[in-house]
Amino acid sequence: MSKSVFFVTCPKGVEYLLADELSTLGLGLVRNAPAGAWVQGPLEAGYRACLWSRLANRVILHIDEVAATSADELYDGVVHLDWQKHIPVDGSFRVNFIGENEAIRNTQFGAQRVKDGIVDRFTMSGGKRPAVEAKMPDVTVSARLHRGRLALGIDISGHSLHQRGYRTEQGLAPLKENLAAALLMRAGWPEIAAAGGDFADPMCGSGTLVIEAAMMALDIAPGRRQERFGFEKWLGHQPESWLSLRQEAEKRAYEGKQGKAPRFMGFDHDSRVISTARNNAQRAGLESLIEFQVQPIEELSLGDDRAETGLVLVNPPYGERLSDRKALSGLYESLGDAVKKAAAGWRLGVFTGAPEFGKSIGLRSFKQYKLFNGKLPAQLLLFTIDEASVRTPREPAAPGEVLPRIANEERADMLRNRLKKNMKTIGQWARKQQISCYRLYDADMPEYALAIDIYEGRVHVQEYVAPKSIDERSARDRLAEALAVIPEALGIERDQMVCKQRQRQAGISQYEKQDVSGEFFQVQEHGVTLKVNLKDYLDTGLFLDHRPVRHWIQQNAQGKRFLNLFCYTGAATVHAVAGGASRSLSLDLSKTYVAWAQDNLRLNAADPRKHKVEQLDCLAWLAARPTPDQLYDLIFMDPPTFSNSARMAGVLDVQKDHAKLIRQAMSRLSSDGLLIFSNNFRRFKLDEDLASEFEIEEVSASTLDKDFQRNARIHRCWHIRQSA
């Protein structure tokens, strides 16, 4: 039997699990790849992967690889392949293009050149050509560009295989089905189920983990309920092999339900998501086998008839925003208390984007796996629920207080000199600009990975987490040196300095509660007064890098209707009011930020009848149909990079969702108005399709003051107008 080569894609971090799974399906590993694996085997094994892989996204049958250092070279390689063997002449196809190089800088152009090559191959002899169909093509051609080579194949899956067909409704923070399956495998669920164990998810949301656990334990093919695959109209399709595999899957599903099944239990405090979970289970054909109940975590009960062994697997809220994060420690501690009472002798798996809160569970983790939830780094923490694993729950704070101490006088002197130099240059510039809050130092020297900000004579120090090449003791020595040097170099008392540790671009970590001092004080910026707090949160209430954006808004807000989306503490709105905005609306999901923004507006004598701040989910508000009074002349939108707050209508990924957010915001912009769109995601790329719909100008360079010139990538900013 001839062998074919396949490229099978999967979520990042799951590659080795995928290779192991594919080997059980008859596909031998050729080589591992980022977010996938190259494998080989008979075509039937490729079909089997489409039907049975619980981890794959797509299965691509490799056709050939051509040189593609230029657009013409790419076209020549494509046009010489025998596409008549793959695509029906009276059918349709589309091209999925991934990758770029110096000659091919966007995927649309690359896809167009591949499409041209395929079409020209058909018409070379004066024959008919297949149609190009974007949504439901007969055949999908995969083109993957890497280092001047283009891998071409047929996507025999036809759609992302994580879509099993049962989840048409989603919870607030849905977990993709194939990632859920990966978590179950890493947590040892197949072995636990084989040993007679039960399964429970005490925060089940829309039920994905429970449903995937049931399908795995009952030997139900994840693709069993899919109505269509990408190979069915491909000219190389072998329908007899496929029919045999479908019949085998039906037989195994039937037999899997006949024996003694484990108990599958899903609980959540929200009756609405339990209703969604039940509907999903019904579509999966498992409604009679899964128990879903409304039950808060504090009341977790698995019943007297639970098995002696089992798995509790949970994906708790990550809590990106401050108002959510401050409750996380208590939530994780409640989870630990609940499982110790209800599931002694079982295994616990916790999948989290905030792994530091694992310390609050009160159990010692025996294994940690690094994975990704979309683009968000996350970890699966595994625990044995027994007395031997019990530890004292504690807050996820940095270990131990760092006391000022100089270990290397020569090195400390370098920092001292740099700070004095910066104070002369940046400090002098700030005074001339009448700016009292500014960044003095931003990891200027690799030995001291710190950001040092001045707030009206007080000093805010943020320590970036040291790179892996520097051991923890060395990093603490250098921080101790910095704490000794900074007050002396800047001429302040030590009690005027606040030091915190944070990760650069850490997303969810930005908003972690640090203290409960309640020490707010007022600062001045371009004539307005703003309230800040240096101690209680990792961020202070004022993003210094956006100072020029706020000033621009102030200078251009006269008579304008102003909208501030994801408003944080409302500083941009205060500047708009100071600039003469006729009315404003500021929206944020956080109760804390909304109250803070209202305080800032009161400090600047804003009329509350004209300038309103509301606690609302911006995603839901934007998705709703605009009302006649929701028309604005100036809109500022600076969304977080990622958010899956439990109170949001969905998950926000700024790279994936920004085009939709911009279009929704533009529907509320007057014909001659302006949207200012900004974000802090370092690898962000603006959707190129937006340029055909709106007038877009990137203004990032003009939105960086002198104190952020060393960190030019701290944010990017665009001015977007309606097309003329």
Image: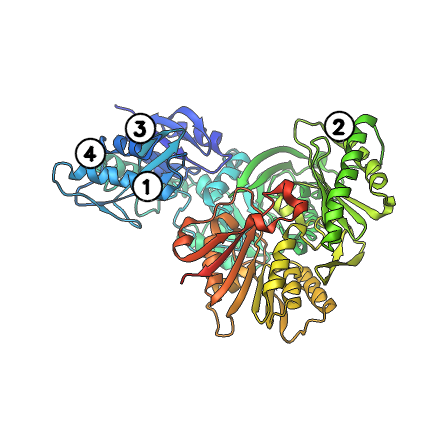
Label 1, label 2: how many angstroms apart (C-alpha)? 50 Å
Name the element at disc 2.
helix
Q: Quadrant of the C terminus?
A: bottom left
Q: Quadrant of the N terminus?
A: top left
The amino acid on which the numbered mark 3 sits, given as a three-letter code, is Val
| Circle 2 residues within 10 Å: few <14, some 14–19, many ≥20 | few
Label 3, label 1: how many angstroms apart (C-alpha)? 14 Å
In this view, the residue in front, 499 or 718, is 718
Q: Is residue 113 left or right of residue 409?
A: left
Comes first in the chain, label 3 or label 1: 3
Q: Residue at x 52, y 39 (%)?
A: 184
| Residue 66: mark | 3
In this view, the residue in front, 422 or 156, is 422
Is residue 689 depicted above or below 129 in this figure? below
Residue 509, position as x, y percentages in the image:
65, 46
Residue 401 in view (yes/no): no
Label 1, label 4: how many angstroms apart (C-alpha)? 20 Å
The amino acid on which the numbered mark 1 sits, given as a three-letter code, is Ala
Q: Is residue 417 left or right of residue 446?
A: right
Name the element at disc 3.
strand
Q: Which residue is mark 2?
A: 474
Residue 355, position as x, y percentages in the image:
64, 41
Q: Which residue is mark 1?
A: 111
The amino acid on which the numbered mark 4 sits, given as a three-letter code, is Lys
Comes first in the chain, label 1 or label 4: 4
| Circle 1 residues within 10 Å: few <14, some 14–19, many ≥20 | many
| Residue 85: mark | 4
The amino acid on which the numbered mark 2 sits, given as a three-letter code, is Ser
